[in-house]
Amino acid sequence: MLQKHRIIDNRHFFWVVNNGDETQIPELEIQGIHGKVTKWDCETGKIEDVPSLTIGMNERIRIAFQPNEAFWIVVDPSQPSDGHLEKYCDEAVLQTIAGIWNITIPETVQPVLENPVEYPDSILPKPLSDWNRWSELPSGFSGLLNYSTHFVIDAPIDSAIIDLGTVYHFAQVWVNGKDCGAKLWAPYKFSTDNLKQGENHIVIRVGNLVNNNYDMEYERKLLGRYLPPETFRSGLMGLVRILSEQ
């Protein structure tokens, strides 16, 4: 876990990061500071109360971090704490969206590349894998692909989380035509209230990095010592799952 402390308007801001690939639900004790605790999400702007317990001059919280998740924990000494700790349950997997995906190239939104490439007329339906290995895509393809499929939900769902699993490196999601947002880093999870009982349609737009537009062998030799292997991968890896909202 990484953290950074700032004081703004007499409130204590802690930027906290789960710098790993597994969900963590730690019990944290903030030393020498006590008061009401909130969680600030920089991606959505959402502010949530966090139950906490004052122990002497310290404040104790229990909070869940998804893999690679980061947010602000804010302590306001001018307000009292809630006096109890949060209870957490694991996210329930409601459904896995498996099988073969239809792949299309949305040509009107492609980036302008330094080394232009020719787009194929079509791409065969695919399982989720690194698209650098697909025979239809030209070498040097750096851009956006749309993954789409239909799936059936047996029972009504008011709201849920679409979890894309592993993505290299950008993702935007539409559920039944409604935009659920876009992300450039993990966790690739998107809230939706647009699922319905019966047949549903999902579109996931994925973009890779611009370095794929250059000589990959040269890039690996030049930058491979400094960049992780994930830098040179492309596409939606999955698993794509529907999770319950806590």
Image (cartoon, helix red, strand yellow):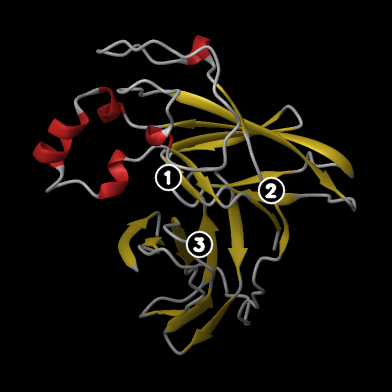
Q: Residues within 10 Å of mark 1 (few under 14, many from 20)?
A: some
Report x, y in % for residue 155: 90, 53
**Image position of 192 with respect to 147: above or below:** below
Report x, y in % for residue 145: 51, 26
Q: CA distance from mark 2 to mark 1?
A: 21 Å
Q: Residue at x 13, y 31 (%)?
A: 218
- Horizontal relation, residue 157 to residue 106: left or right: right
Q: Amino acid at mark 1?
A: Trp
Give whichever of 191, 14 is nearer the camera.
191
Report x, y in % for residue 6: 32, 58
Label at residue 118: none
Q: Earlier in the sequence, mark 2 or mark 1?
A: 2
Residue 82 in which image quadrant: bottom right
Q: Earlier in the sequence, mark 3 or mark 1?
A: 3
Look at discs 2 and 1 and give the one toward the viewer.
2
**Image position of 121 with respect to 15: above or below:** above
Q: In the orientation shown, which residue stands out farthest toward the bottom?
A: 56
Q: Determine which residue is flagged by label 2.
A: 97
Q: Determine which residue is flagged by label 3.
A: 66
Q: Determine which residue is flagged by label 1.
A: 185
- Horizontal relation, residue 226 to residue 184: left or right: left
User: Is label 1 in a helix, a strand or a loop?
Assistant: loop
User: Is label 2 in a helix, a strand or a loop?
Assistant: loop
Q: Amino acid at mark 3?
A: Gln
Report x, y in % for residue 130: 42, 40
Quadrant occupied by the C terminus: bottom right
Give whichever of 199, 137 is nearer the camera.
137
Q: Earlier in the sequence, mark 3 or mark 2?
A: 3
Q: Amino acid at mark 2?
A: Ile
User: Is label 3 in a helix, a strand or a loop?
Assistant: loop
- Horizontal relation, residue 151 to residue 188: left or right: right
Q: Residues within 10 Å of mark 3 (few under 14, many from 20)?
A: some
